[in-house]
């Protein structure tokens, strides 16, 4: 009788050869590396956002000598000029935000209905990205050179057709609203287009299979889905117009009807003794309004993000 060789049991697990597993120390190094990678961003935010906000806030409650005072805040409310400037700035921002949201939303809807990979869509989106940033002195000069008293269109109509246009409105708040709407429309397209892209054909088909028409779909499905994104874009346009300065400064040379021009006037011209920091109090008011609007915008965007893919 021959002996049967003993069977060697197989090992339960064979770990592949490789580097030694990393320990807790290397994990801490990776975490420190992540924080170091964000250091330039934090420096940027600190220097250009946090520090100026602190300077404005402290200056709004101090005198030129650095002593605490409520006089700067009181001067804002005691004058008729500053509240009127705030009111006109809010009216200007609301009107241009609504116009930009309506026309920009319609333009975004026309774009999303086309070929998603087509050349026309890429051109419109690229042009909107450029025009949304085409502001400041360049935009004011473009309108003045085109529609001003001696603008290209004004002189062409006068010399060729004998039509004399009164273009004085361009130098008022009405003209400023028209100029602001110029860059509000493409900004709306850029902001609102991803939400329109998030609408799915399956949702419309499901609504149609249950007997709902186009109106029922937009009332019960599409409208509620797009409403947070539309309102968020509207608030963003409001903030964009409310805080704009360079275009108004280049277009309006007489007076300071809006709050940004009032702040510039307080910072650049001679002021009443003891009111050197009133401009910082005005800036603090702008910061509070913009902060409230952007907080509402962030809350709306969190609700809208669930539908954006």
Image (cartoon, rainbow, N blue to C red):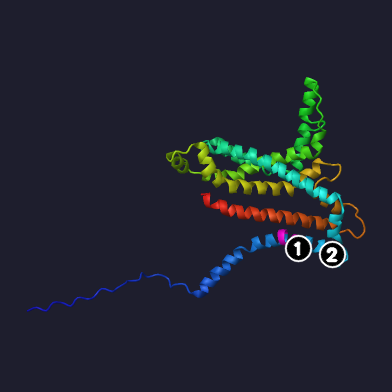
Task: Farthest residue to the left: give it.
Answer: 1
SS at mark 2?
Answer: loop
**Residue depicted at 53% across the width and 52% down the height:** 306
Task: Farthest residue to the right: give it.
Answer: 273
Q: Is residue 95 left or right of residue 19?
A: right
Q: Is residue 264 visible?
A: no
**Residue depicted at 51% across the width and 71% down the height:** 27
* Residue 170 vertical position relative to residue 262 in the rendered view, above or below: above
SS at mark 1?
Answer: helix
The picture places residue 204, in percent across and down from the top left corner, at 47, 41
Q: Is residue 100 left or right of residue 200?
A: right
Q: Nearer the viewer, residue 218 or 20?
A: 218
The picture places residue 246, in percent across and down from the top left corner, at 77, 46
Please count the marks in the image: 2
Task: Farthest residue to the top: give it.
Answer: 161
Q: Are marks 1 and 2 in contact (CB under 8 Å)?
A: no
Residue receiving disc 1: 54
Q: Nearer the viewer, residue 160 or 248?
A: 248
Residue receiving disc 2: 62
The picture places residue 284, in percent across and down from the top left corner, at 78, 57
| Quadrant in the picture for residue 57 | bottom right
Of badges 1 and 2, the one in the foreground is 2
Boundaries of the magenta span: 48-53
Callout 1: few (<14), some (14-19), or many (20+) C-alpha neighbours within 10 Å?
Answer: few
Q: Nearer the viewer, residue 160 or 23?
A: 160
* Helix, strand or loop: magenta stretch: helix
> In the picture, which quadrant includes the N terminus?
bottom left
Disc number at residue 108?
Answer: none
Callout 2: few (<14), some (14-19), or many (20+) C-alpha neighbours within 10 Å?
Answer: many
Q: CA distance from mark 1 to mark 2?
A: 12 Å
The picture places residue 291, in percent across and down from the top left corner, at 70, 56
């Amino acid at each position: 009788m021959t002996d049967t060789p003993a069977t060697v049991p197989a090992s339960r697990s064979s770990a592949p050869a490789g580097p030694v597993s990393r320990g807790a120390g290397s994990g801490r190094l990776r975490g420190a590396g992540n924080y170091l990678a964000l250091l330039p961003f934090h420096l940027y935010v600190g220097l250009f956002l946090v520090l100026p906000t602190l300077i404005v806030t402290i200056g709004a409650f101090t005198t030129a000598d650095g002593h605490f005072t409520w006089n700067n805040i009181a001067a804002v409310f005691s004058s008729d000029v500053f509240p009127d400037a705030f009111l006109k700035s809010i009216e200007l921002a609301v009107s241009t935000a609504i116009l930009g949201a309506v026309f920009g939303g319609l333009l975004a809807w026309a774009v999303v209905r086309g070929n998603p990979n087509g050349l026309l869509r890429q051109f419109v989106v690229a042009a909107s990205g450029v025009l949304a940033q085409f502001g400041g002195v360049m935009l004011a000069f473009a309108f003045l050179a085109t529609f001003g008293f001696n603008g290209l269109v004004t002189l062409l109509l006068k010399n060729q057709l004998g039509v004399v246009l009164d273009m004085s409105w361009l130098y008022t708040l009405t003209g400023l609203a028209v100029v602001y709407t110029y860059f509000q429309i493409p900004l709306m397209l850029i902001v609102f287009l991803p939400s329109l892209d998030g609408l799915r054909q399956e949702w419309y088909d499901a609504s149609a299979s249950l007997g709902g028409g186009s109106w029922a779909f937009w009332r019960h499905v599409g409208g509620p889905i797009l409403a947070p994104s539309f309102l968020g874009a509207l608030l963003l346009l409001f903030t964009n117009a409310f805080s704009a300065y360079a275009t108004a400064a280049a277009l309006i040379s007489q007076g300071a009807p809006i709050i940004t021009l009032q702040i510039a006037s307080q910072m650049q011209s001679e002021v009443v003794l003891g009111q050197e920091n009133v401009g910082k109090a005005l800036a603090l008011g702008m910061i509070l309004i913009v902060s409230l609007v952007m907080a509402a915008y962030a809350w709306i965007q969190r609700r809208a993000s669930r539908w954006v893919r």
